[in-house]
Image: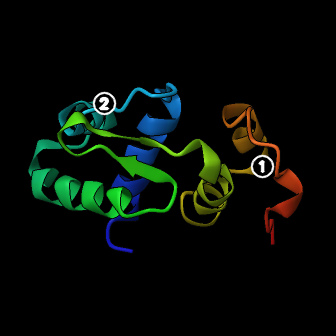
Amino acid sequence: MKDTELVCSIIRVLVTNHGYGKPLPADVVLNKASYPPHKGGDAKKALEIVRRQSFIIDHGNRGIMLDNGEFGSLVQFLYDNCGWDEFELKLRIKHFEGWEEIDWD
């Protein structure tokens, strides 16, 4: 995955600002991700990568949000690709009930 750091920053914004039924507009997500201005094109590419993930609901111009039914794939992605440890995941993804299905290896 190209520029995993930006992808992970974008997903962190979505996890931190998650609200049921409240998509975040792309410009808000990128602003909150605090990417350096010289990475503008890379950040937009990273946003497109995030939009294609199974745990994202894309509302077009209204923005993107986490899919509550796909928290398992979100947790696995964050663990495998973003370096989130089990403690942080359990702290941040409180409403997930499938912890025993996560591959911690």
Instruction: Name the kind of residue labelled 2 in the image.
Output: Lys
Q: Is residue 90 above or below residue 105?
A: above
Residue visible at 59% across and 54% down in the picture: 74
The quarter of the picture where residue 7 lies is bottom left
The quarter of the picture where residue 80 lies is bottom right
Is the C-beta separation of discs 2 and 1 under 8 Å? no
Residues at marks 2 and 1, CA–CA distance in whole angstroms? 24 Å
Q: Is residue 86 above or below residue 61?
A: below
In the picture, measured across the screen, residue 19 lies left or right of residue 36, that is right
Disc 2 packing (10 Å; few <14; some 14–19; many ≥20): some
Residue 91 image position (x, y, % from top left): 74, 32
Residue visible at 27% across and 38% down in the picture: 63
Residue 23 image position (x, y, % from top left): 36, 32
Q: Which residue is mark 2?
A: 32
Residue 103 image position (x, y, % from top left): 79, 68
Residue visible at 61% across and 53% down in the picture: 70
> Could you say whether the residue bearing mark 1 is in a helix, strand or loop?
helix
Q: Is residue 9 above or below residue 53?
A: above
In the picture, measured across the screen, residue 74 lies left or right of residue 61, that is right
In the picture, measured across the screen, residue 2 lies left or right of residue 53, that is left
In the picture, measured across the screen, residue 82 lies left or right of residue 40, that is right
> Could you say whether the residue bearing mark 2 is in a helix, strand or loop?
helix
Instruction: Name the kind of residue labelled 1 in the image.
Output: Glu
Q: Which residue is mark 1?
A: 86
Give the residue at the far right of this rendering.
100
Q: Earlier in the sequence, mark 2 or mark 1?
A: 2
Disc 1 packing (10 Å; few <14; some 14–19; many ≥20): some
Say which of 18 and 12 sits in front. 18
